[in-house]
């Protein structure tokens, strides 16, 4: 599985150093939670911060849009040098159009689903999606407890992807990921684990990342 530390849990006073630390520790991706204070209560950072960090690391950038009108961010994120963009099914209307808009820029497109959002929201889109992001906490805050029933949701999504002829579909999981549940997540069919406090909350990032691999 790929490990994607979430910048939301980093020390914001020294972001460049934090990013370089997890890269040296063996991270595969850098997860970037963009929040607008509307779709979720909090504000985080936007494309200018992401663009400023781009020269600091070779890690692929995985931008997770927790925003209303996600399409308004695509131009700036493309210019900032991201490799992946996911938007929330609950925040958009024309999902097919937005997926193709992202992919036409040479960027991988993902659909994010909140814990209470049914997989049916993604089912028709599985043939064209690069990945699906399953939220295992309610979005908007770091450090939340993992919602156990999302394991069954991941299993169901893996079966749906295989039935749709997409065994290569990546399933990303975000929220409450720790060394206590990584084996269950792997068994369920997850490919990418977003880890916030379980990586950035540790002094030894290399050991923290290795503890999430199984």
Image (spheres, rainbow, N blue to C red):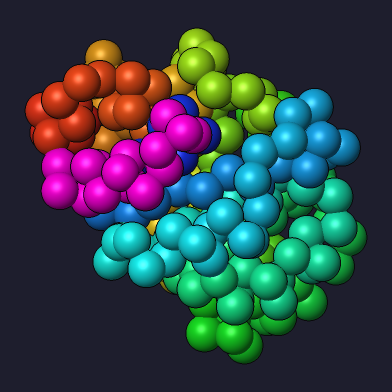
Q: Is residue 10 above or below residue 51?
A: above
Q: Is 72 drawn above or below residue 150 in the view shown?
A: below
When asked about the image quadrant of residue 210, the answer is top left
Report whether residue 1 is seen: no
Indicate yes or no whether the magenta region holds residue 15: yes
Give the extent of the magenta segment. 11-26
Residue 135 in sight here: yes
Front one among 103 and 165: 103
x%, y% of residue 205? 19, 31
Whether the magenta-drawn stretch holds residue 8 is answered as: no
Kindly identify the residue that appears in the image at 74 percent across and 29 percent down: 42
The residue drawn where x is 85% and y is 50% is 68
Above or below, comparing residue 2 to residue 178 in the picture = below
Q: What x and y, as percent, mark residue 158?
A: 43, 48
Residue, x 26% and y 49% (percent of image)?
Answer: 20
**Which quarter of the rendering shows the C terminus?**
top left
Left or right, 51 with reference to 73: left
Q: Could you tell me what secondary structure mostly forms the magenta stretch?
A: helix
Using the image as rendered, state which of residue 41 and residue 120 is in the foreground.
41
Above or below: residue 138 compared with residue 187: above
Tell how many labels: 0
Work out which residue is located at the far front of the displayed protein and give it. 13
The residue positioned 32% from the left and 40% from the top of the image is 18
- 158 or 86, which lies in front? 86
Q: Position of residue 193 (x, y in %)?
A: 35, 40
The percent coordinates of residue 6 (x first, y second) are 43, 38
């Amino acid at each position: 599985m790929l490990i994607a530390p979430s910048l939301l849990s980093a020390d914001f006073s020294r972001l460049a150093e934090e990013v370089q630390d997890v890269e040296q520790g063996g991270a595969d991706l850098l997860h970037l939670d963009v929040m607008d204070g509307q779709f979720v209560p909090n504000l985080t950072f936007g494309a200018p911060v992401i663009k400023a960090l781009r020269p600091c690391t070779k890690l692929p950038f995985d931008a997770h849009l927790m925003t209303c009108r996600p399409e308004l961010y695509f131009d700036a994120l493309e210019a900032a040098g991201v490799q992946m963009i996911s938007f929330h099914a609950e925040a958009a209307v024309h999902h097919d159009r937005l997926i193709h808009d992202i992919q036409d820029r040479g960027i991988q497109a993902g659909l994010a689903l909140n814990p209470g959002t049914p997989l049916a929201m993604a089912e028709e889109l599985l043939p064209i999606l690069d990945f699906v992001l399953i939220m295992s906490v309610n979005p908007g805050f770091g450090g939340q407890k993992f919602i156990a029933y999302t394991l069954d949701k991941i299993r169901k999504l893996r079966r749906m992807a295989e039935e749709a002829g997409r065994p290569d579909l990546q399933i990303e999981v975000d929220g409450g990921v720790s060394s206590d549940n990584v084996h269950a997540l792997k068994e369920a069919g997850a490919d990418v684990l977003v880890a916030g406090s379980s990586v950035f909350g540790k002094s030894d990032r290399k050991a923290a990342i290795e503890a999430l691999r199984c």
